[in-house]
Amino acid sequence: MLTAAKGDSRRLETVLESIQKNIHSSSHIFKLAQDAFKIATLMDSLPDITLLKVSLELGLQVRERAHAGRRDDERPANKDGAREKEGWSDRKRRE
């Protein structure tokens, strides 16, 4: 469906909405984001900006789902055994 809708922003919007509504697996959405990126950046043509936006939107959806799924008790404890309020991945990036 992504390949067939390439270049048609209305069809791509419909495909994106359908994916977001009907596919609940983050790994499947991630794979579709990768596929959309590959289709958008085929070597024999200029990148399809609309399809790149679809790829980005799907990737962000996976990120949001992963972030929302992490609970406070899954975060590592600090030296005193207390859970940090700040995201542990943010702290890791600063170190």
Image (cartoon, helix red, strand yellow):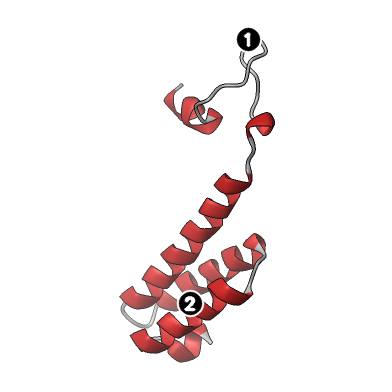
Q: Nearer the viewer, residue 47 or 74?
A: 74
User: Which residue carries the number 1 mark?
Assistant: 79
User: In this view of the protein, can residue 37 be seen by the observer?
Assistant: yes
Q: Give the number of the disc on residue 65.
A: none
User: Which residue carries the number 2 mark?
Assistant: 16
Image quarter for residue 40?
bottom left
Q: Nearer the viewer, residue 28 or 24?
A: 24
Dot 1 amino acid type: Lys
In the picture provided, is 43 more to the left or to the right than 24?
left
Disc on the earlier residue, 1 or 2 = 2
* In the image, farthest residue toward the bottom: 4
Q: Residue drawn at (68%, 33%), measured in percent from left and top? A: 74
Q: Which element is circle 2 on?
A: helix
Q: Please tell me how crowded label 1 is: few (under 14), some (14-19), or many (20+) other residues with Cα within 10 Å.
A: few
Q: How many marks?
A: 2
Image x and y of residue 32, in percent: 56, 71
Image x and y of residue 62, in percent: 55, 57
Q: CA distance from mark 1 to mark 2?
A: 44 Å
Q: Residue drawn at (56%, 22%), measured in percent from left and top? A: 84
In the picture shown, does residue 67 fall above or below 92? below
Q: Please tell me how crowded label 2 is: few (under 14), some (14-19), or many (20+) other residues with Cα within 10 Å.
A: some
Dot 2 amino acid type: Leu
In the picture provided, is 29 more to the left or to the right than 12?
right
Image x and y of residue 71, in percent: 64, 38
Image x and y of residue 55, in percent: 45, 68
User: In this view of the protein, can residue 48 be seen by the observer?
Assistant: no
